[in-house]
Amino acid sequence: MNVAYVYPWDIVGDPSAPDRLAGLGVEAVALAASYHSTRAATPYHPSHRVLDVPYPAFYLPIRPSSWSRLVPAAPTWTPEDAYLQARDALKAVGLQVHAWTVLTHNSHLGTANPDLVVRNAFGDPYPYALCPAQQDVLEYCERLVEEILTVGEPDGLILEACGPMGFGHQSVHEKTSGADWTPTDSDLLSLCFCTACADRYPADTRDRVRAAIDRTHPTRSTAATDSPQSISTTHTSTTAADTTPASTTTATSTASTTTAASRARATSTASSTTATSTTADTTMAGTATPSAQPLTIEQALADLADEVRAIRVDLSDSLRHRLIAVARRTAPNTPITLHANPNPWAAGAFAPLPSGEPGADVLVANCWGDPATDAIRLAQLKDLSTPGQRIGAYVLTLPPRPADAAVLADQLRTYAKAGATEFHLYHAGLASPQRLAAITEALRQHA
């Protein structure tokens, strides 16, 4: 089965949309039922060309009695039942409709409830990131899934951000790249130290993370007693960072490469007594001299890595197990698709799944980067899958990928060889006519 991703506003108000999507050669459409804020091109809609979506919204009628502390917002830019209208129009042309459900990524609820969001080791909040260690967040996600299955009656359920969001996030006017922080820094800045998370970690974890980010040796002078709220006012460094998502790294950080790089770094460090190797070697007030930059998060956390990793994976596992249980209880025969990453340190839309998930029907890996790297990630998910479980490739058909059917078809072949049995195509509502033609031809060639 191949799946095209769209928004409700791509369908509602555009009578030509269902036939256009059916003409791609896909069997199903992933229709956003709960989605974050965005600014979207609408190249085909008869009424507009750009739609501003200023806050995350729920595209089904909101029944107040179905919610607890956290209640999703209704849209003003589409009808409140936009999902239902779009679903019916798509099913009328023979397409299956799967509910694309974004879970912990919600800046509207995070901003209104700052006690429920992810906080890094410096106490900085990520308002877009609801922390699944918080009971109110778990309950919200359960109710979200239950409402979508009950009211939306989809042909399938797609779970995105089914775990903690992390540092790698494109927010409004993102200004984080200039600090030259590395993917390891992004992993470290994705560790949550909110009130529900901080006490779960081994002692000194916060100190270890802060020291690694600032390239200093850990100190117990202040960090051990700082609360998340007070930390953010006492630390003097900026919040800039490399925006490369940690989830794009694979779970198999090649040991031989790491070892060789470590030897090279050790040699370089031994031959130099000054901090001239990199401008990233900054010092936090009150700490010791800069230390060598860690190559991996395991090196940064050292003896704490195994325990911290297990705690992080458990956050996603707990949320996923609860939501699958709710889904099976509410709609037993509805297939469940997980956006997943075999990397145990992953944070974001593709949650960590280092041990697999037999309760899901489809495991989908992100394929937005280098196809060879994407294929490795797909193969890892395939190795984690159970008999009969399908593997999906989440394929980018937008820039910087070219609008070229031959290139796309070659990528599909690469992903299929790695284990993908279906393609999830992002994004049929945003793609130009040339890109839609490339999707159609690439799927025809692969059939």
Image: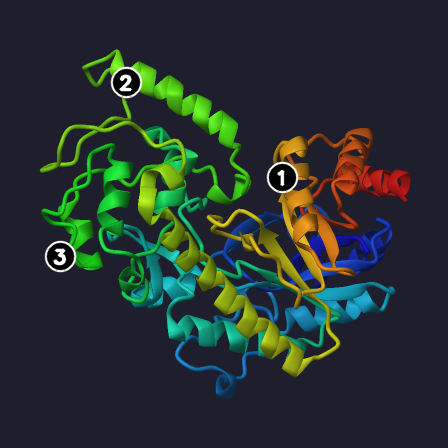
Q: Nearer the viewer, residue 11 or 146?
A: 146
Label 3 packing within 10 angstroms: few (<14), some (14-19), many (20+): few
The answer to whether the residue labelled 2 contacts the one labelled 3, judged by CB atoms less than 8 Å apart, is no
Is residue 152 something one can see in this rendering? yes
Mark 2 or 3, nearer chain start: 3
Left or right of residue 403, residue 135 in this image: left
Say which of marks 1 and 2 sits in front.
2
Residue type at mark 2? Answer: Thr
In what quadrant of the picture does the C terminus appear?
Answer: top right
Q: Nearer the viewer, residue 49 or 360?
A: 360
Residue in view at x 61 percent, y 55 percent: 339
- Location of residue 149 in the rendering, given as x and y in whole percent from the top left corner: 65, 77
Circle 3 sits on which residue?
A: 225
Relative vertical location of residue 62 with respect to residue 403 in this rendering, above or below: below
Label 1 packing within 10 angstroms: few (<14), some (14-19), many (20+): some
Say which of marks 2 and 3 sits in front.
2
Residue 127: quadrant of the picture: bottom left
Q: Which mark is residue 269?
A: 2
- Distance from the alpha carbon under mark 1 to that under mark 2: 36 Å
Mark 1 or 3, nearer chain start: 3
- Location of residue 381 in the rendering, given as x and y in whole percent from the top left corner: 65, 49
- Location of residue 204 in the rendering, given as x and y in whole percent from the top left corner: 22, 51
In the rendered image, the residue lying farthest to the top is 271
Residue in view at x 47 percent, y 51 percent: 347
In what quadrant of the picture does the N terminus appear?
Answer: bottom right
Mark 1 or 2, nearer chain start: 2
